[in-house]
Image: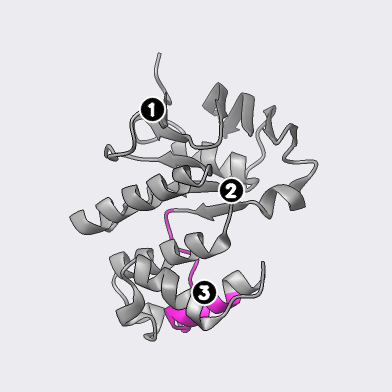
């Protein structure tokens, strides 16, 4: 489903990604690990099309993700370090507009996603008044609402307490059970179903 072949990326004079290659299939979570600066965030951003690698190819369903970017983007959900939320809008308003760009979405569906991520209680507050962990929960609801086959998650447990970290593992496991595919950069191990994890350590010799 997802094939990454020979990616090389430089940032200035630093060779961040050195020929990174892997494949991800339905029901798998490609778990990116490595020290700070190993290139985990850069790799996810290259896959998402937010950075262009100098060499290499990202393929989705056998076609170039760059060449067929619109089709690829319609099937992915990306969550980076900073949740993509507008501070002056409420969590509910953010989801209504961001998901609404992709497809029609109604209040019951939004409420269901907010409930699943534990964000319903503060969904009608301006995002700028929320804690970092609360914003993360709202953003995770957005990932659910995207209905995407591919999730690209950069440190998804950042700013979450122990319950929130378990929630992320549960959401990923549910995505895998639907035959979805997840690529996640993590610092901490996630309790995921046996046999579903494809480990990829960046920066390793």
Is label 1 or label 3 in front? 1
| Magenta-drawn stretch contains 91 | yes
What quarter of the picture does the C terminus occupy? top left
Q: What stretch is highlighted in magenta?
A: 81-97
The mark nearer the N terminus, 1 or 2, is 2
Q: Name the residue under label 1.
A: 195
x 30%, y 80%: residue: 121
Neighbour tally class for label 1: few under 14, some 14-19, many 20 plus, Cα within 10 Å: few
Q: Which residue lies furthest to the top in this view?
A: 205
Q: Residue 22 placed where, x, y %?
A: 55, 24
Q: Residue 78 placed where, x, y %?
A: 53, 53
Query: Which type of secondary structure does the marked residue at label 3 adopt?
Result: helix
Q: Mark 2 points at which residue?
A: 149
User: In the rendered image, which quarter is residue 136 located in?
Assistant: bottom left
| Magenta-drawn stretch contains 126 | no
Q: How far apart are the two marked residues, 1 and 3, measured between alpha carbons?
A: 33 Å
Q: Name the residue under label 3.
A: 95
Query: Which type of secondary structure does the marked residue at label 1 adopt?
Result: loop
x 27%, y 37%: residue: 189
């Amino acid at each position: 489903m997802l094939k990454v072949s020979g990616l090389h990326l430089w940032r200035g004079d630093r060779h961040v990604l050195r020929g990174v290659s892997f494949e991800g299939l339905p029901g798998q979570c490609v778990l990116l690990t490595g020290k700070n600066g190993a290139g985990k965030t850069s790799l996810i951003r290259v896959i998402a099309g937010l950075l262009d690698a100098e060499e290499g190819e990202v393929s989705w369903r056998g076609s170039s993700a760059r060449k067929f970017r619109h089709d690829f983007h319609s099937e992915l959900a990306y969550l980076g370090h900073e949740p993509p939320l507008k501070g002056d809008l409420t969590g509910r308003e953010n989801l209504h507009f961001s998901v609404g760009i992709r497809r029609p979405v109604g209040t019951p569906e939004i409420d269901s996603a907010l409930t699943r991520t534990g964000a319903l209680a503060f969904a009608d507050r301006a995002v700028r008044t929320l804690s970092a962990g609360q914003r993360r929960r709202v953003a995770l609801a957005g990932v659910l609402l995207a209905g995407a086959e591919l999730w690209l998650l950069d440190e998804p447990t950042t700013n979450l307490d122990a319950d929130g970290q378990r929630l992320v593992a549960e959401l990923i496991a549910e995505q895998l059970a639907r035959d979805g595919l997840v690529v996640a950069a993590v610092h901490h191990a996630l309790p995921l179903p046996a046999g579903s994890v494809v480990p990829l350590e960046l920066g390793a010799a």
